[in-house]
Image (cartoon, rainbow, N blue to C red):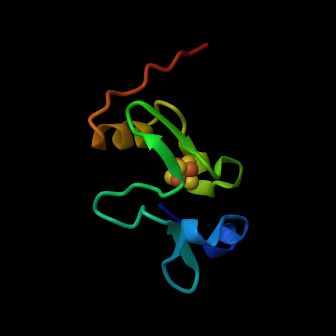
Amino acid sequence: MSFYWSEAGTLPAAKTERLGPLMACMAGTNSATPHCTALTGVVGQQVQCIVYDQRPSPCREVEPGDDKCIRARARHGLAPLAVATT
Ligand code: SF4
């Protein structure tokens, strides 16, 4: 889940990782078992993004119950969210 380095400008430096001259990712996500260091709490119980207002575009594109959400939850053994449609 990479993004242009310029998006990292508002994020704490320790919460991002440079991937080259133009790209960055959230620290902890460039791994075989990704876990963003900005995510606090216990997955499956209660979590919080501590940079929610500054989160980069790939994070903003994920919607509850969409394909990316389903895949991320499945990696932690969680069922898809039951999303209400109106
Ligand atoms: S939404 Fe927040 S906790 Fe989740 S990956 Fe993005 S920055 Fe990390």
- Above or below residue 82? Residue 45 is below
Name the one closer to the observer, 78 or 60. Answer: 78
Q: Quadrant of residue 32?
A: bottom left
At horizontal 64% and vertical 54% (from top left) the residue drawn is: 55
At horizontal 32% and vertical 27% (from top left) the residue drawn is: 79
Please indicate whether residue 53 sits to the left or right of residue 34 in the image: right
- Above or below residue 76? Residue 23 is below
- Above or below residue 11? Residue 84 is above
Question: Picture coordinates of residue 53 (x, y %)?
Answer: 71, 49
At horizontal 29% and vertical 44% (from top left) the residue drawn is: 75
Report how many numbered discs are placed on residues in the image: 0
Question: Picture coordinates of residue 76 (x, y %)?
Answer: 30, 40
At horizontal 61% and vertical 13% (from top left) the residue drawn is: 86
Question: Picture coordinates of residue 9 (x, y %)?
Answer: 71, 71
Please indicate whether residue 15 sits to the left or right of residue 53 in the image: left
Residue farthest along the bottom direction in this orientation = 21
Please indicate whether residue 40 sits to the left or right of residue 50 in the image: left
Name the one closer to the observer, 71 or 75. Answer: 75
Please indicate whether residue 40 sits to the left or right of residue 52 in the image: left
Residue farthest along the top direction in this orientation = 86
